Image (spheres, grey):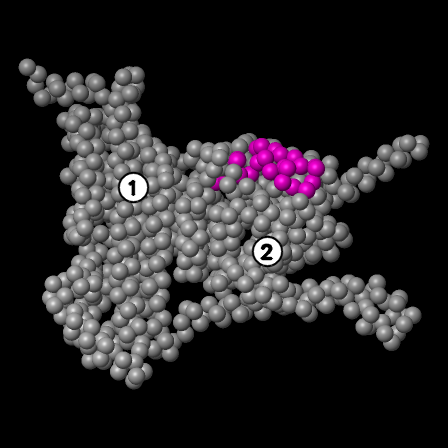
Amino acid sequence: MSTPFENAQKLFAMSPLHITPESAMRELNDVREKIARGAERLGQFSEDELAIATAPAEVVYREDMVTLYKYQATTDKRKGIAVLIVYALVGRYQMIDLEEDRSFVRKLLGEGIDVYMVDWGLPTAAQRWLTMDDYVSGFLDNCVDVIRKREGIDKVNLLGICQGGVFCTCYAALFPNKVENLILTVTPLDFHGDIDNPERGAGYVGLWTRAMTAEDVDRFVDTMGNSSGASVGFAFLMMNPVHNVTKYTIDLIDILDDDKKLLNFLHMERWLADRPAMPGEVVRQWFKDLYQGNKLIKNELVLGGRRVDLNDIKMPVLNVYAEGDVIIPNACSKGAGNHFGTKDYTELGVPGGHIGTFVGGKAQKILAPSIVQWLMKHSERHKKAHAERHSATVAK
Amino acid sequence: MADAQSPLYDLWFKTIPGFFSGMLPPGAQAGPSPSDAATTGESAPASSVEQLAGILGTMNTMLGKLYEMWMPLLQRGDLAGTSLESLASANAEHLRQFQQAFMRPDMSWPQLEAFANFAPLAQSYAKMMPFGENFAGMMPQNFAAMLPLAQNFAGMMPFGQNFAGMMPQNFATMMAAPQSFAGMQPFAGMAPLMQSWSSSLAALTNTHAPWRTSNPLRIGMERTFGGLADAFGLGATRQFDLAWRELLAAGMSKQHAQAEYLVVVGEAWNEGTQRLMKRLREMSERGERVDSFLAFIRLWARSVDGAMHEAMQSERGLQATAKVLRAATEFRQHIQSVVKLVSEALFVPTRSDMDEAYREIQELKRRLRRLEKSVEQAHQAAPAAAPKRHAKPNGARKAAKPKAAAEAASPPPNEANPSNDANEATA
């Protein structure tokens, strides 16, 4: 007959858990020391170290809470191509310039592109009646006009990110004469693309929104007004609720001794915590017309009394999707070429997730250079210069 | 940079103690954490760095508690044996009891109070509710303002003293309840509130025997004197009565929806623990070892996260989420109705008034933007028209009237027809 101690030993031998009281105490002490060091280090970081979006830029236009920036050029070898970047309303534009060595904007500047960026600002309760049309035909159109005037050009290159990509798509359809090239990144176009091609673990926001009725959306907007930044962030956090807890606990412990990783973490957190509210009427249209009605791809979306017809988009289109995107499933963003009026449609898959595409090391090497290469090929100014060079050679 | 956007951090900051206490062995109770003060609202750190430092402090305490609780099991060498199995079965038992309580038609809220293991989930959940902190801050003030009104109702309410006597109690309970929300103890804190509400609702919906007896009298009183109250301009009291009853019913519906949601979460939690057990058995068969406590927590988190992820994206999870949102927004709608009635009675601008003002301002801005655009286009068109002006100075200005300006002068489709897209969305 075995003694209790022998039984315990047998169990211990059988179990994969080999944590002894001594090792547990040792681990606890190590962790506590690490936490103490980490907490001290957190207190030592200066505001300069914690700052995000530090690429120098000047304000070239303001309207209500919207600001248009132009980034300072970082090279003399400029290509004479100006791009307007349009970010989503669900986050702040700083994500594309998170850190000096993880900055999509700096990559474009380094390639000699003139970069403009529209910051949608932080809407308050007073802005709850802003519609998608106010953003597209109002703010965005004004920004485009400012750039056209400053640069002395008729058409601009638009680069939309996620929801900003949808705004750019609508703009290009409604104001085709003002758009030279349309670049979409991680942009939902077919909001129901994931119904027939479900991707495990992806598209929670779409699933969640479609589980609601149109009346639910109306009641949400009517009672809440704007959708607060925290509630928008919460919808994303709920995709991986437990993981998001461990991220702030045991995963955080792992990086406490590494300043670079800790600062990366803090920069990303600073961006995450700065979520703006989304105007109520935009939420209503976004959920009902797009997530529920899928009206964009069906050419049924109406903004300010004008129908958005993708067939009117006849300028070249580059559609970049993130191969590991779980926010916008690939089925919702790619394969949309035959819906546009243009014959010059290119798709590009980039490694990384929805955000990783812009901040990940691997994607950084692909995204900006690919976009610049495509722009060079499609820029009117460059085409003209190329043609002139060609005819000069022929004349000789 | 708005570090003031701390609710996002706050959410997790408050979830973390619950996350760790959820991992304590069966029967073990986590002691009060030093971070409790920081999780109860006012003293919450303002910046993300401070919040993260606070999280580390919480972790330090909770990890210590966790190790302390598990140490006797470690000393007995019983970590992977009966203790883990009993943890898994305790989870299942809690879930079973919760479901049982939930399924009862006369759901007993004090019983739910006993489900301490669900408290962390409920805590984080309460924080996520749309009314959130506003509710917590708003309600005591509103109810404090409403209390004298309720006492005045005694003389005029159709069902007289009973309701008037009941109201101050309800208000008093509700004034305390938001404090519980802020302190993130929803089940424990909501129990007295729910008891109070349940009894009020029972009375008001005629399920309470004494009330049933007096029902004809109530109807008679209402028919006779209700009209009189209206005639003296006291109609708001009747509206308030109706709005209040609807608010109570919506509150109960919301609690039901939350409980249903928590069942889905609880099941996923339970499924995650079962998956952990399975994984440990598989690791054992492969001869793999876990020799760090943090690694063990990671295994557990991965198992629960997978189960939670699937549950939340399942049809049932999505429906439960939609139902909670539906019930919560309906509840909020009723709160707004009550507040509106009180505000109107006190000649205070209502939310609808403010909304209407914002809407008009926005519409004016829209018109201004269009006007500015057309003026700019007119300016741009002017140089082109200039030579013509030289040739025909008298009629040129009229002839050169830019098309854009003419378009701006006529209302765009959405103004001409209020049922158009832009306004349709806001109707």
As drawn, the residue found furthest toward the top would be A1
Looking at this view, name the residue that lies furthest to the left: A1
The residue closer to the viewer here, B278 or B245, is B245
Percent position (x, y) of residue A392? 89, 35
Other residues around mark 1 within 10 Å, as few (<14) / some (14–19) / many (≥20)? many
**Left or right of B95 on screen, residue A233:** right
* Residue type marked 1: Val
Image-quadrant location for residue A147: bottom right
Q: Residue furthest bottom?
A: B232
**Residue B274 is a magenta residue:** no
Residue B264: give its label: 1
Residue type, numbered disc 2: Leu
| Picture quadrant where residue B192 is located | bottom left
* Residue at position x 26%, y 40% in the image: B266
Examine the rendering and report whether any part of residue B268 can be seen. yes
- Chain at numbered mark 2: A
Rendered view: A229 above or below B59: below
- Helix, strand or loop at disc 1? helix
**Residue A221, percent across and down?**
44, 58
> At 35% across and 58% down in the image, what residue appears?
B330
Residue A95 in view: no
Q: Name the residue under label 2.
A: A303
Bounds of the magenta segment: A327-350
**Of labels 1 and 2, the one closer to you:** 2
